[in-house]
Image (cartoon, grey):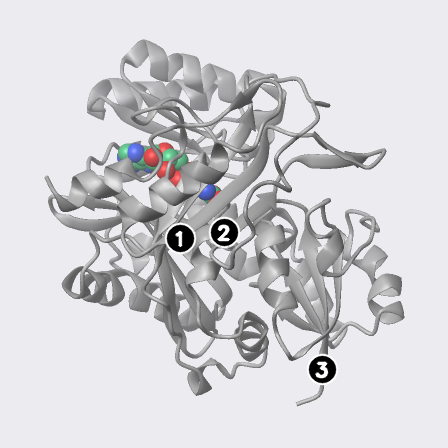
Amino acid sequence: MSKLNVLLIGSGGREHAIATFLARSPLLGTLTISPGNPGTVSLGENVQSPGNKPELWMPLIKQRSVDLIVIGPEQPLVDGWADYFREQGLAVFGPSKEAAKLEGSKSFSKEFMSRHGIPTAAYQVFGTHNSGSEGEAIDWIRQNGHFPIVLKADGLAAGKGVFICQTLDEAADTLHQYQQNQTLSKAARQIVIEEFMEGEELSVFVLSDGSSWQILQHAQDHKKIGEGDTGLNTGGMGAYAPVPLVNQELLEIIENEIIRPTLDGMRAEGHPYSGVLYIGLMLTNQGPKVVEYNCRFGDPECQVILPTLENDLLELMWAVSQENLHQYTIQTSGKIYTCVVLASKGYPGPYETGFEITGLDLASNDEDTYIFHAGTKEQSGRVITNGGRVLNVISAGNTLQESISNTYKIVDQIHFENEYHRSDIGRKGIRSIKP
Ligand code: AMP
Ligand code: GLY
C-alpha cells in the first residue's frame, strides 16, 4: 500500500494523542494538523485553521495531497463536514451528519433508543422556545418527576447542557437558564427531562465502518472538578483504561443489548455509522443503560485508550474509511494507562492564562509515558498556559494502582502558576474491584 497523507482536524489533548500514534505508523506519508498545538509541532506540520466551513479547507487539502481526513471534535461532524469531504471524493474518519445526530441531538438519540429497545433512562422531550412550553415542562416535573431529576439541552453545549436537579425550584431555575443564557439557549430549543440513574459510569469505544464493528477499548472518565466526584461538571479531569471492573460477561451484555442494536438500528434507518462511537453507560442495578452517545473519541479518554492499542492506528482508521474493518482484529496490550489533567485554577469557571510551564523536559519520556498538550501556547521559546485544561499526563502500569502511582510521579515534576489537578484519578476503579 502506498503511503497516506493525513489531515487531522483539531487542537486538544485528544488530537495530540491521535497525532502521536498516527506519526508512529510506517504507512504515514505527511501529517498535517490543523490547527494543532505546541505538542503536535514535532509530529507533523501545524497549519492554521482555514475557517469554519469545510469548503475553505479544500485548497489546503489539495495542496497537501491529503488522502485521509481525521476529524477530532464533534462540532464539524455534527455540522456535516464528513459528508462534504466524502462528496469531494476524499476518505474520512468520522460519521456523517445524520449519524452524528446520535450526539448532536439528545432528543433524536433518546427516540432512536426507544425505537430500537436500547436500555436508557425514561425521558420526556419538551420545547422551550416560548414561555408556555417552559410551563409545560415544569408542570410535567411537578406531576411526574422524582428527584433528583436530570435536565438536558438537546443540542451540543460543550458539556454544559446537563443539570441534575434536586428540587422543583432547581428544575425551574434550570429551565429559566436554558431560555436566558445566551450560549445555552440555542442548544436548548428542545430539552430532554430524564430519570436519574444510579451506578458506576463506564465509557465504551467502538470502531465501526458502517458494516462491521469491533470494541476498541473501555475507559472511565472523571467528569467532576472536585475530589471524590464532587462539584461542577468539566470536559474531564482524568481517565484510565481499560477498566478492571469490566469482565467478559458484562461486555457481552453491552454488545448484545446496546452496541449491536445501535449500529444495526443506524444502518436500518439508512445512516450507517462510520468512525468511533463513544457510548457513555451507567451500570445500574437493572444492568447497563446508555447515558449518552458521542460521535468521536472522548477527551481525555482517547489519551489512555490509544496507548493500549497494539494495532497501527492509521491502518485501522484507513480501514474504517474504506469499509474494510472486518480484515483487522483489534488487539490491546493488557497494560493499564492513567491520565491526570493539569488544569488552570478556576476551570470550569473563569481562569487566568499565560503562565510559563516548567518540567516538561524533566518528565521522563519512556515509551509508556506521555505528556499531551491541551491548552498551551508557545511564546518566545517558552510554553505557557492557554486554556482551562492545560496538559494531560499519562503513564502505564501492569495494575491500575501501579499506573496511577507512575502517573502522579510525572505530575509532580510539572509546574505552572495556578495549577490544579485532582489527586484521586483512578481511585474509584480500585474501589470497584475491591468493594
Ligand atoms: P451527558 O452529557 O449526557 O453525558 O451528561 C453528563 C453527565 O451527567 C454524565 O456523564 C453523567 O455523570 C450525568 N448524567 C447524565 N444523565 C444522567 C442520568 N440520567 N442519571 C444520572 N446521571 C446522569
Ligand atoms: N470526556 C468526556 C467527553 O469527551 O465527552
Q: Which residue: 60% across, 16% down? A: 350
Percent x, y for residue 400? Answer: 29, 48
Q: Tell me, for residue 396, which label it has, or none.
A: 1
Q: Secondary structure at mark 3?
A: loop
Whether residues under marks 1 and 2 lie with C-beta atoms below 8 angstroms apart, the answer is yes
Can residue 398 be seen from the camera position used here?
yes
Q: Amino acid at mark 3?
A: Lys
Q: Secondary structure at mark 1?
A: strand
User: Cα distance, mark 1 to mark 2?
Assistant: 7 Å
Question: How many other residues sit within 10 Å of disc 1, few (<14), some (14-19) or many (≥20)?
Answer: many
Of residues 160 and 233, the one nearer the viewer is 233
Q: In this figure, which residue is indicated by the disc labeled 2?
A: 369
Q: Which residue: 61% across, 59% down? A: 20
Comparing labels 2 and 3, the label whose residue is closer to the camera: 2
User: Cα distance, mark 1 to mark 3?
Assistant: 31 Å
Q: In this figure, which residue is indicated by the disc labeled 3?
A: 3
Q: Which residue: 37% across, 23% down? A: 136
User: Cα distance, mark 2 to mark 3?
Assistant: 28 Å
